[in-house]
Image (cartoon, helix red, strand yellow):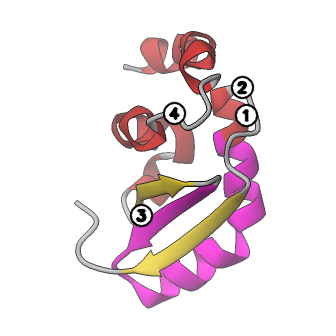
Amino acid sequence: MEKIAKILPAVLKSQVRRTEPPLIEILAPLWPCVAGKAMSEHCRPVAFKQGTLTLTTECPTWKTQLQHMAEEIRAEVNSYLGRPVVKRLRVLQGKQVH
């Protein structure tokens, strides 16, 4: 999986070039590679609309931490995708992540 995760950003660039890519379909299965294992165990991407990526977490502490890290997360996702697709990050507290 790690080898695939390393080459996928190059492959995904063509998918991300569309106006409104199916970003959740791209990110959800790769979220541990994009966000890292620790973060992916506590949050997941659930929606993408008009440049806003929405993450959900079960824990209020993680919600606060993710909100503080929003710019870092946004930059990492965009770096992974090879293009600045995510303009804003929104974090919600919701049902179980997994």
Give SS at disc 1. Answer: helix
Kind of residue sitting beneath label 1: Ser
44 is within the stretch colored magenta: no
Residue name at image x 39 percent, y 83 percent? 59
Is 74 displayed left or right of 97 in the figure? right
Mark linked to residue 46: none
Give the x, y percent position of residue 89. 64, 64
Q: Label 2: few (<14), some or many (≥20) within 10 Å?
A: some
Q: Does the residue at mark 2 contact the one at mark 4 (Cβ under 8 Å)?
A: no
Q: Is residue 4 above or below residue 97?
A: above
Is 67 displayed left or right of 43 in the figure? right
> Residue beneath label 2, please?
82
Kind of residue sitting beneath label 3: Cys
Q: Residue 93's image quarter? A: bottom left
Looking at the image, tell me whether mark 3 or mark 4 is earlier in sequence order.
4
Q: Label 4: few (<14), some or many (≥20) within 10 Å?
A: some
- Of residues 69 and 11, which is closer to you in this image? 11
Q: Which residues are magenta?
A: 52-77
Give SS at disc 4. Answer: loop
> Residue beneath label 3, please?
43
Query: Which mark lies nearer to you, 1 or 4?
Result: 4
Q: Does the residue at mark 1 contact the one at mark 2 (Cβ under 8 Å)?
A: yes
Q: Label 1 to label 2, Cα distance in Å?
A: 5 Å
Kind of residue sitting beneath label 2: Gly
> Residue beneath label 1, please?
79
Give the x, y percent position of residue 56. 41, 70
- Of residues 29 and 26, which is closer to you in this image? 26
Q: Does the residue at mark 1 contact the one at mark 3 (Cβ under 8 Å)?
A: no
Give SS at disc 3. Answer: strand
Give the x, y percent position of residue 88. 70, 61
Query: Which mark lies nearer to you, 3 or 2?
Result: 2
